[in-house]
Image (cartoon, rainbow, N blue to C red):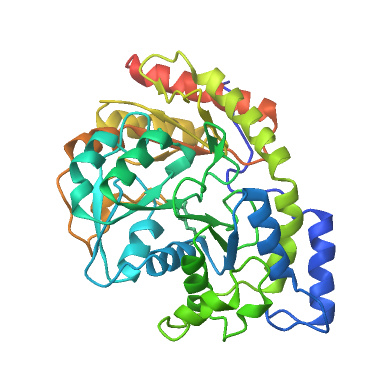
């Protein structure tokens, strides 16, 4: 009888007790709106912003309603207008092109490499097509950020980083989100901190920060922010910037503050699990491990491997056989999007270019979540199952 994994791929850890206590305090006093503060109280949201800015080494931070909202706000704050074109990854998640569509702009997709990062040659070739790059560190893979910034600086391209999968990651020691003009994070349940929904935006640019704060719906109460530029900067932008409400509330902020203090510990726990799976599947015939560059400090909250140039029905057979043994894999080659696996040709509100190079890679990407509720033994067992089933299908058993 072959072994079957019985854990859940969607079960996250409980909210830490310290966060629950902080949330209860907010519920007891009832001041959930971020600008509803008593006396000289700062408010959980303003404190969260100050702490996250410090943690990331950024001057300014804004907490918002979701990661997707942070992305659209960043685009508006750097000046993207209706009808503009915005460079972005062909391999990313739906909220990324969605944020570009939200501001009435059009995505220009850049190819993905076998390392699952943005293709810097294709980026160079398309650099004259837009003034802004919405760079998605999809599934936590960082490209050569030094080279990318060189290309973008040379071409005068403003970089916004989508760090939904790279909160806590770094390239050559510089934290993800600190290379571009703006870094955006998601605090949604399946990311690295969990407030159900939520987003964070960081920048060192005072006008971008002021515009983002006004955009989020600050009702001219920006003076209550602790990670914001001075009032003179707001004076320059406040009449030109619309209110597009998307604030964070004190309840979510209260839940997030203790989790952010634990981020490093959690990253280490994710990476132990990631390496257990990676080691277990390495060397499986027909399966390509995505090698992590030495310069990359990653967060292994999910793992990808490639079944490169496999026929679709054989990949489907692997997924079916793994699922039958309790291992939930997602495939980016699926003709119809399933859960989060939508691809650039699923976003039909925008023009779909022909990207044969990306198509080949997308057709080979298999993806698995690595929740912290898995033990190391769970991870080893999952790897054994993947290894056996990929091997069996590869050998035509
Ligand atoms: C989750 C996610 C987002 C957006 O986050 P939400 O908080 O769900 O809006 C953006 N980019 C990527 C790659 C994501 O996975």
Q: Is residue 86 above or below residue 262?
A: below
Q: Is residue 183 left or right of residue 229?
A: left
Residue at image point 80% right, 62% down: 20
Q: Nearer the viewer, residue 395 or 22?
A: 22
Q: Nearer the viewer, residue 264 or 6?
A: 264
Residue at image point 39% right, 20% down: 287
Res. 244 visible in picture: no
Q: Is residue 179 above or below residue 235?
A: above
Percent x, y of residue 25: 84, 72
Q: Is residue 203 above or below residue 244?
A: above
Percent x, y of residue 323: 48, 36
Percent x, y of residue 264: 70, 40
Quarter of the image with the N terminus is top right
Q: Is residue 182 left or right of residue 35?
A: left
Residue at image point 30% right, 28% down: 314
Percent x, y of residue 315: 33, 31
> In which quadrant of the rendered view does residue 373 lie?
top right
Quarter of the image with the C terminus is top left
């Amino acid at each position: 009888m072959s072994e079957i994994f019985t854990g859940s791929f969607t079960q996250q850890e409980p909210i830490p007790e310290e966060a629950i206590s902080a949330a209860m305090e907010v519920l007891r006093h009832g001041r959930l709106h971020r600008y509803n503060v008593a006396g000289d109280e700062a408010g959980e949201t303003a404190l969260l912003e100050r702490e996250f800015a410090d943690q990331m080494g950024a001057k300014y931070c804004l907490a918002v309603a979701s990661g997707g909202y942070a992305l659209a706000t960043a685009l508006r704050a750097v000046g993207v207008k209706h009808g503009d074109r915005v460079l972005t990854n062909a391999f990313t998640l739906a909220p990324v092109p969605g944020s570009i569509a939200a501001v009435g702009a059009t995505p220009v997709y850049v190819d993905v490499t076998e390392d699952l990062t943005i293709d810097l040659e294709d980026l160079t070739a398309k650099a004259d097509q837009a003034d802004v790059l919405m760079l998605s560190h999809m599934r936590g893979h960082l490209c050569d950020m030094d080279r990318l910034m060189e290309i973008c600086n040379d071409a005068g391209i403003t970089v916004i980083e989508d760090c939904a999968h790279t909160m806590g990651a770094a390239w050559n020691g510089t934290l993800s989100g600190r290379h571009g003009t703006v870094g955006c994070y998601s605090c949604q349940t399946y990311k690295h901190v969990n407030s159900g929904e939520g987003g964070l935006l960081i920048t060192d640019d005072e006008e971008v920060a002021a515009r983002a704060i006004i955009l989020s719906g600050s009702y001219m109460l920006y003076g209550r922010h602790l990670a914001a530029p001075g009032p003179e900067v707001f004076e320059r932008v406040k009449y030109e910037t619309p209110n597009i409400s998307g604030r964070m509330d004190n309840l979510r902020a209260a839940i997030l503050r203790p989790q952010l203090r634990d981020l490093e510990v959690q990253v280490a726990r994710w990476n132990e699990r990631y390496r257990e799976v990676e080691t277990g599947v390495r060397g499986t015939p027909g399966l390509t491990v995505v090698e992590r560059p030495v310069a990359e400090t990653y967060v292994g909250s999910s793992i990808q491997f490639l079944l490169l140039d496999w026929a679709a029905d054989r990949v489907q057979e692997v997924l079916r056989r793994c699922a039958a043994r309790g291992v939930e894999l997602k495939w980016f080659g699926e003709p119809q999007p399933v859960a989060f696996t939508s691809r650039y040709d699923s976003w039909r509100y925008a023009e779909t270019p022909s990207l044969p190079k990306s198509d080949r890679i997308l057709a080979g990407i298999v993806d698995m979540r690595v929740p912290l509720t898995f033990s190391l033994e769970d991870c080893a067992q999952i790897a054994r199952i993947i290894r056996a089933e990929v091997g069996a299908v590869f050998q035509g058993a």
